[in-house]
Structure formats: structure tokens, C-alpha cells
Image (cartoon, rainbow, N blue to C red):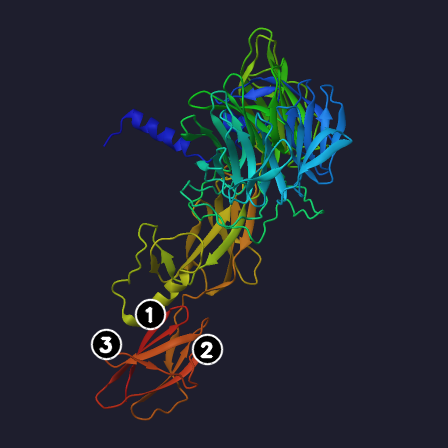
Amino acid sequence: MRRPAHYWLLLLFVLSLATVVGASEPKFWTVANQSGFLKGNVDNVVVDSDGRVTLGPTSKVLSETQAPFIWDLHVEPDGALLAGTGNQGQVLRLTQAGESTVLFDSQELQVHAVLRAPNGSLFVGTSPDGRIYRVKGEKDSAPVYDPPDKYIWALAAAADGTVYAATGNKGRVYRINAKGEGSLFYDTKAAHVTALALDEKGRVLAGTSSPGRVYRIDASGKAFVLLDSPFKQIQAIRLGRDGTIYAAAMDPTGKSAPAESKSDPTESSSEQPVPTVTTDVVVTGVGEVPLSAVSDQAKPEPDATPSAARGAIYRIGPDDMWSSVWESESDLPYDVREEPSGSLLVATGNEGKVYRLEGDPVRTALVAHAAAEQVTRIEATRDAVYLATANPGKIFRMSTARATEGTFVSEVRDAETAARWGTLRWRAETPPGTRVELATRTGNTSTADATWSDWSSPYRKPTGSTIESPPARYIQWRARLRGSASASPILTSVTTTYLPRNRRPEITSLTVHPPGVVFQRPFSMNDTELAGLDSATAGQRAAAASIAETDGGTVLGRKLYQKGLQTFAWQARDDDDDSLVYGLSFRRAGEREWTPIEHNKTDAFFTWDTSSVADGTYVVRLVASDQGANPPDTALSVERESVPFEIDNTPPTIERDPKSSDAPGTVSLIVRDAHSPIQRVEYSTDALSWREAFPADGIADGPDERYAIRLKGAGATRLIVRASDTMANIATSEFSIK
């Protein structure tokens, strides 16, 4: 049948698509969506939900404190900031110029709560000895209330001056009146109360740890669970302008389960909540447990179906209906705050990122990336947002005005081996008065450090600039955006081209199958007997085939037996995913010269017709090469030799023993094999019924065996003898009977 011309063109096109891209082909690293850009670091730029990088709010470090943690932050009317810190248990006062003084120095290690009450009093909650202080100055402070609990996690004040304290490790809320008299307000029976706020009606909102719930408690102490989250802890509670409640929930293990109705815990846990969990610092002393320690009394979490989410932001409306507005599998939300526009800022760890959530449906943008592991608190004024961090403890000031210059630094790209760099291309919109400049640097350590090359000079050709950085394994690029107060460039994609150094393939196994075992091309895994073979030799063939099942290498088809054939199978790999071609050659044991038997083979098995060579012991050499995917000067190969194996295609010989004087009905025989041991001898008088003969020494295991076959009864005139060796060679001879 004639094929139309377009058929052959289509066939050629399909075959071209099937070509394996190997090490000789360039690799392309493209960043062109939000998930790709979120892996980088931002400075005065924003990554929006559409994967666009634009100039964002100006941010700068206001103060680099000596404290490793800043847990709470309060903005004073004069613009000064009050920061609760650890591990020295101090409250710092910071000016807008970044000047820092110690306002309060406690005897405890941590200050998790700083509260300026409506009447102007300043209250401080400390841990791990759980005290509440009234502070008037560095040398003017006094304990107000010392609850029986170990930790003070949060404070909140009502309009009448009543102060509420969230505590652990018994999960209680205490109420302290204006006289400093404290009493138990509500016992959640959770491990900790970690977040506290008051709603518009003065009701207490409490977030707990183990389990992660949000309670609303009225003045009489009657509680109602607004949210029973699947997360371990409610880290922060904030109020929106219309009475909406926002809750930040987290679970560092990332195994949150669907929410379910739970009765109140009957026994509290002494496990510490996440606010003091850090990856690098463990605090011991003054009776404080290690930051990530779990008490033996901790209750196990319900074993529900887990999800990958590690954190979420919940919205609880004025009608008490709640919904999740944001979830993350990588970021832990430490705080959430509503902006004047109605959007939300979310502070996260452990990469120090700040997100903006806006719109319906919610659109997420990365607006800041602090040089710290956790952004623990967000406070704001009319013209600035302040970020408190931990690991290390810093204060950042983020302006509401857009920056005129910003930087995006990509993640480090691993080429997996030394590579030569090609071109850098990018797409960007550059309104008049704006521009985008890219630069690169390279190195051989997974983290960019002083051993890396310097940043290259700016590349200015978006359609393709040759990368100037030296060859190395790792590469990183930096984009600088320059604009004005009224216009910003928009970066939408960056593509880096590189050519990895070719890596040598590896042969991981080379299997020599038993002689005669062959395989059909894979189309059926059924193992059936071969038709037309008698039971005497079928057992030997079945035994050989069963050995072939254990090679653990290439998946082959149905097993067959074919005398004189020898099958080899192997496994090889190439870390560059290059297609491999194979060549085989052989030599006889004791010889040096190799004789080729196959070349340019793409299958990982080969069957050799050994009838073309003499009997003996042989070795096969396998060569795997990536020459089909690389130029001749860069192609690499690897060799592997097989274990020695036997080739024996000559059957045994059967002859009468000339030295034996046979009695009537007895036939003495010598069975010899030039290369293999004798395995089995059988005899028959009618070629139908066969009986096994046993050698004179009782064991058939040598190349030269003697037999004395005694026939019972009379009438037989001939004896048919069949002998086989361990290589399944069979000989048959006939002898007359006297």
C-alpha cells in the first residue's frame, strides 16, 4: 500500500521527538511563575500571584539587637518601639534612628508579651517563671501578679484596665484587676494558651496549643469554641476593622488532619508551643526545658489522615462562620495583620518571608524577605510597617511608599556536575525611565560564599547575553529593578542555559544466564513447557530456566531453552540520562586478544550462538558508551568483564569397556566427556521405558564414569544408552546383548 507523503513527514517528526536529549544538549533553567520566584530572595521588590517581579515597599533594618529572639513588638505614640526579647529577658526601647536602650531587664529568660494598657500602664509577661510586671522605667518595675503557671505567652487589656494573661503549661487564662489582684478566668484544659485578644464587645479571644483552637470567652467565663483547627497551635489572633477575627495556625510537623469534633482535653500537656522553638538555639537554665523538648505528659495528637500543610490563616466572620484564606506547605505563620486597604500581611518562618493576601479569591504576593529565620511580629503606623524577627533578633522598617530600586536574587541552581554556561535571557516590561539589569555568579559549593566568583558586570541584552561567570557546578542570578515613584519595571521570566560536563556511564550488573536459557521479546510473562520434549530432558531445562529468574536485571520475556545459545543481560545507567549503546567481545580463558561479537547494540541483553566457537572456558567483555548523545571528543565509555563461563556443545561418548568380561545379561560401559562432568546415564531396551544407571563409584560427577548395566529377564537383544553432561549435551548409543 502506498503511503501519502505527509505520512512519512509525520513519521520523521515523531522519531525526532523520540530522540533522547543527552549531555551534549544544553539544559534550560527557566523561572517564570510565582512558585519559581518564591524560591529566591527579595529586597524592595514584590513577587505577585501572577509570577511578576515588581518594585515593592522600601524596607531596611532599623535595629540589629544583640538578642537572638524578638517575640513581641509595640509601637509607642511617639514612634518608639518596645521589643520583648530572649534570651536575656529584656524589653528594649528603640528610636526611629535605631538607637536602643534597655527599658526593663527581668530575671527570667524570655519576654513574650509587652502590653501598653489603655490607662498608659506598661505590662510585661516573662517566662519561664511566669510573672507579670508593671514597668515604668529601667529601674522602676514591680511584679503585679505571679500565677502558678510556668509561661506567660500573651497579654491583653480591657477598656476598664483589666489585664488578661495567656499561660502555659496548663492552658489557663488569668484576669488581673486594676489593684493587681489576679484570679483564674478560664481553664481551656489545653497545653498552652498562646494567643490573646479582645473583640469589639470586650470578650476574650484565646488561641490554644495542643489542640489548636480559638475560644471566645464572655465576662462570666462562659466559653465557646469558634474554631477547632486541624493544626497543633494557634500562634496569633488579630481583629479586623469590621469585627472579623484572623487566626494564624501552625503545625511544624506538617501533618495537619481534617478538623473534627473533640471534647475538651481532660489533662493538659507540658509540651512547649512553637513560639520558642528554634532550629539553632536550645535554652537551658533557670528550670527552662529545651526549646523543642516534649514532656512525657504530652498527649498524643489524633491519628487522622494527615495533609502536607504546615500553616494556615483563618478568617472568622462576624457571623462566626470561618474559612481558611491561606495555607502553606513550607511556611509557618507567626503573625497576621490587616492593612488599611483590607489586605492581610502574614509573617512567617523559617525563611523570614512576609506575604500579602488580598482579593477574593485571595491572591498571594511575597512583599518582604527578612535576613532572619522567623518574622515573629508585625506592627504598623500610618506610614510604616515594623517587622520583628528571631534568629537573629532584628527590627525592620517597611515603608508604605514604593521603592525606586530593588533586587531579586534567585535560588542556587545545581547543574549536578561542572558546567559551561551559555546565555542568559529574560522577559521584562520597562516603561520609560525604568530598566532591569541581570548579573550572575558561580561556585562549587551549594551555598554561595566567599569562594564563589564575584557578580558579573550587568547583562543588558534581554534576548540573550553570554554568561561571563566561570565554569562551575552552581550558578545564581540577580535582577536589579530600577524605576521611579510613578513607574516600575516588571520582570516575568529568566532563562539560563548551560551545558553540564559529560559524566561516564556505569554498568551496575552483568548477568551470565545458564547455558541454553533464552528469552522471547517481552510480550507475555507466562512460563509454559516446550512442546515435543520428553520428560527426561525437560526437567533439566526447567531447572536452568528457574535459575534465570533470579538475575534481578533486565526484564525479559518468556523463558525458553535452546541448545548452544548463551544469554547475557545487564543493567547500566547514565547520570546525564544519555542513551547508551553497547558492544560485546569475548576471549578464551588464558588468552589476551578480544574478538568482537556485537556492536552498537541498544538492548540490554544479548544471546550468543556458541556453536561457532570451540568448547572451553570464556569471558565476555561489555562496553557501554554514550557516543550516541555526545560528540566524539567528549563521549565516554565504561567496561565490565563477566565471570568465566563454560561453553560445551560436544556430547559425551559411550563405549563398551574393553577390559571388562561381561556376564550374560550385563553390559559394561565407559562414558566420557572432554569438557564437562557426566550428569546422568539412562538405558532402555525398547526406547520407551527408561531407567537410570548408576556409576561404579556411586556418584556421577566426573568426566569419565564406568557403568555395569545388568538386565533382568530374557528376550532383550539390544540395549539403548542415553548419557548427558552438566551442559545438557546428550548422546545416545545402541549395544547388542549377548
Image position, residue 623 (x, y; %): 52, 49
- Cα distance, mark 3 to mark 2? 28 Å
- Numbered circle sitting on residue 688: 3
Query: What is the three-letter code of the residue carrying label 2?
Result: Gly
Could you tell me if residue 630 is visible in this image? no
Q: Residue at x 51, y 38 (%)?
A: 310
Q: Residue furthest top?
A: 432
Q: Residue at x 71, y 40 (%)?
A: 108
Q: Nearer the viewer, residue 562 or 390?
A: 390
Question: In the structure shown, which secondary structural element does the residue marked by tag 1 occupy?
Answer: helix
Q: Rate crowding at label 1 as few (under 14), some (14 to 19) or many (20 or more) other CA atoms within 10 Å.
A: few
Image position, residue 386 (x, y; %): 63, 23
**Does residue 426 sit above or below 195 in this rendering?**
above
Question: Which residue in the structure is indicated by mark 2?
Answer: 702
- Cα distance, mark 1 to mark 2? 21 Å
**Does residue 698 sit above or below 433 in this rendering?**
below
Q: Residue furthest left?
A: 715
Question: In the structure shown, which secondary structural element does the residue marked by tag 2 occupy?
Answer: loop
Q: Residue furthest right?
A: 139
107 horizontally vs 172: left or right: right
550 horizontally vs 449: left or right: left
Could you tell me if residue 623 is visible in this image? yes
Q: Nearer the viewer, residue 508 or 362?
A: 362
- Numbered circle sitting on residue 539: 1
Q: Quarter of the image containing the C terminus?
A: bottom left
Viewer-nearest of discs 3 and 1: 1
Q: Rate crowding at label 2 as few (under 14), some (14 to 19) or many (20 or more) other CA atoms within 10 Å.
A: some
Query: What is the three-letter code of the residue carrying label 1?
Result: Gly
Q: Quarter of the image containing the N terminus?
A: top left
Image position, residue 164 (x, y; %): 58, 34
